[in-house]
Image: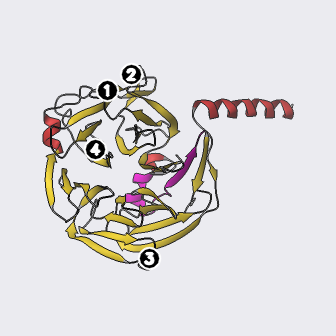
Amino acid sequence: MRRGLFGVLTILLLIATLVIGAVPVAARSHVRVLLDGLSSPKALAAGSGRTLFIGQGAYGPPGPILAYNIRGRARGTTDIVLDVASVADLAALPDGSGWAIGTDLVLYHATADGTITPVLNIPEYQVGDPDPYKDPGADTESNPFGLAVLPNGDALVADAAGNDVLRVPLVGEPVTVARFAPEEITPGTVADPVPTSIAVGRDGWLYVGQLTGFPGTPGTSHIWRLNPDAVGAVCDVTVSDPNCAVWKSGFTGIVDLAIDQASGKTYVYEIAEGGFVAFEEGFATGAFPPAILLLVQGNKRTELAAGQLSQPGGVVVMPDGVYVTDGMFTGGRLVRIRGNN
């Protein structure tokens, strides 16, 4: 009888793995805190080989944008790029230029010599591009949350309230690459998609992570594969669109993701095992649950730095390891993770 039960459980586990995704396993990781006492450092971007850019002030007091050197004789040094700023996300190009989403919801471009130019007021754009899945009044909400940049320099914005991805050139008109439709999570329960994060894959396509709105059911978040040249694509689990489809499922409250351009490994940063509902309890108790950092390789999912991260910010891949920021509300950190990654 026990053998029969074991066999049934094995089959159920196999089905769950095929449908939802591989069950994560914990890996031994070497975790080192490189900077502490940062002010809500959600924004994190990889520079040209040896530099990390850290943006502060996403949910707290403003702080300078920092450049942190990861290699060479200057290893560990921190320079101020911009003295005082409040940014939600950053993206950088090898030539030293980059983009930033300010907490004023404006998209800014920065040249290599430090000239900063406002390019797009994102809420104003959304007024003229309402979400067709929302009721009037809520259909023009905007919360630009995630940022990436294409090799040609165009910015990509994931708007968590507008439920879309925008492509913004330095010269020319912005376009809505794709809209994300609500999804019926259980019979009668429909959740907003809430796209939060975006990365450019080795294949040139975009990979978009979602948080998934109320009730925030664990395991219901997807990573979508999106054509960067699309205009008005539909990302909907019930609709077949060649420009946007689910790539992998079974995640919980994705906050950020990163793709290693050398290996194709994908790193998924989740808000907490129990999703945003469990996370929000931390505001009342003062004890936030651990964040989850997953390494995704095919159907294998490995948790890195288990139990050692909380209140997740950003994640990037560098030559000597994976870097994350955390502590968005209780003292921000820059952390390097090595081992099994």
> What's the amino acid at mark 3?
Arg
Instruction: Mark 1 or mark 3: name the one nearer the start of the chain.
Output: 3
143 up-or-down from 191: above or below: below
Callout 2: few (<14), some (14-19), or many (20+) C-alpha neighbours within 10 Å? Answer: few
Q: Which residue is mark 4?
A: 157
* 270 with respect to 328 (left or right): right
Instruction: Mark 4 or mark 2: name the one nearer the start of the chain.
Output: 4
Residue drawn at (37%, 45%) of the image: 197
Callout 3: few (<14), some (14-19), or many (20+) C-alpha neighbours within 10 Å? Answer: few
* 173 with respect to 28 (left or right): left
> Residue 241 bears which disc, if any?
2
> Residue 75 bears which disc, if any?
3
Instruction: Mark 3 or mark 4: name the one nearer the start of the chain.
Output: 3
Marks 3 & 4, CB-CB < 8 Å contact: no
> What's the amino acid at mark 4?
Val
Alpha carbon separation for disc pair 3 and 4: 31 Å
> What's the amino acid at mark 2?
Asp
Q: Position of residue 187 (x, y in %)?
A: 46, 23
Instruction: Mark 1 or mark 4: name the one nearer the start of the chain.
Output: 4
Alpha carbon separation for disc pair 1 and 3: 43 Å
**Foreground label between 1 and 3:** 3
- Say whether residue 280 is magenta: yes
Residue drawn at (15%, 49%) of the image: 119
Q: Nearer the viewer, residue 271 or 117?
A: 117
* 137 with respect to 144 (left or right): left
Q: Position of residue 162 (x, y in %)?
A: 25, 37
Marks 2 & 1, CB-CB < 8 Å contact: yes
Alpha carbon separation for disc pair 1 and 4: 15 Å
